[in-house]
Image (cartoon, grey):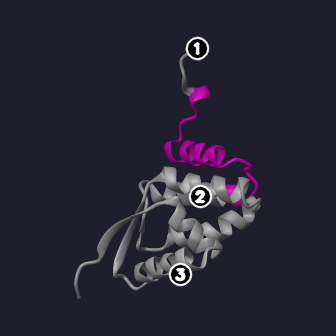
Amino acid sequence: MPAPIECAVDANIILRFVLGDEPGLSAKARTVFKAMEDGDVLLECDPVNLAAAVWVLSSQYKASCAEIAGALLPLVKAAGFRLPEKDRYIQALEFFGQGVLRFGDACACATAIATACFAWIQLPEGKC
């Protein structure tokens, strides 16, 4: 079996797959994610693109935090979906789905837990 092809994925591909709102582009996005599921492709995603997808779903499509997390978590958790510090972003999406209202705040919470460091507590006195 040949090695999987590594491909970059951006917010638009994620959005077309999740939303299925543009027949031609959504079909292409389904093909990409099917290839990932089949092990033919590894999808490399930058955290900025994940955040962009969250923002568009929230602001433009008025999806709830729970709906967004429900749509994105299966994709991000997939073995063929590569994301730097993947576990941290999975936890951030879980926090977001549980009611943390801003994805950036959910990411900060996940980072604080992962590093066990809260800047406002750890900084020397007078350095804030």
Q: Between label 2 and label 3, give the one nearer the viewer.
A: 3
Q: Where's residue 32, x and y in %? A: 44, 77
Reading the image, the residue beneath label 1 is 125
Question: Is 126 displayed left or right of 61 in the figure?
Answer: left
Q: Amino acid at mark 3?
A: Ala
- Seen from this angle, which residue lies furthest front? 24
Q: Relative to 64, does residue 34 appear above or below in the rendering?
A: below
Reading the image, the residue beneath label 3 is 27
**Element class at badge 3:** helix
Reading the image, the residue beneath label 2 is 53
Give the CA separation, mark 2 to mark 3: 18 Å
- Seen from this angle, which residue lies furthest left? 2
Residue 2: quadrant of the picture = bottom left
Q: Where's residue 53, x and y in %? A: 59, 58
Q: Residue at x 73, y 59 (%)?
A: 65
Q: Relative to 16, does residue 110 appear above or below in the rendering?
A: above
**Element class at badge 1:** loop
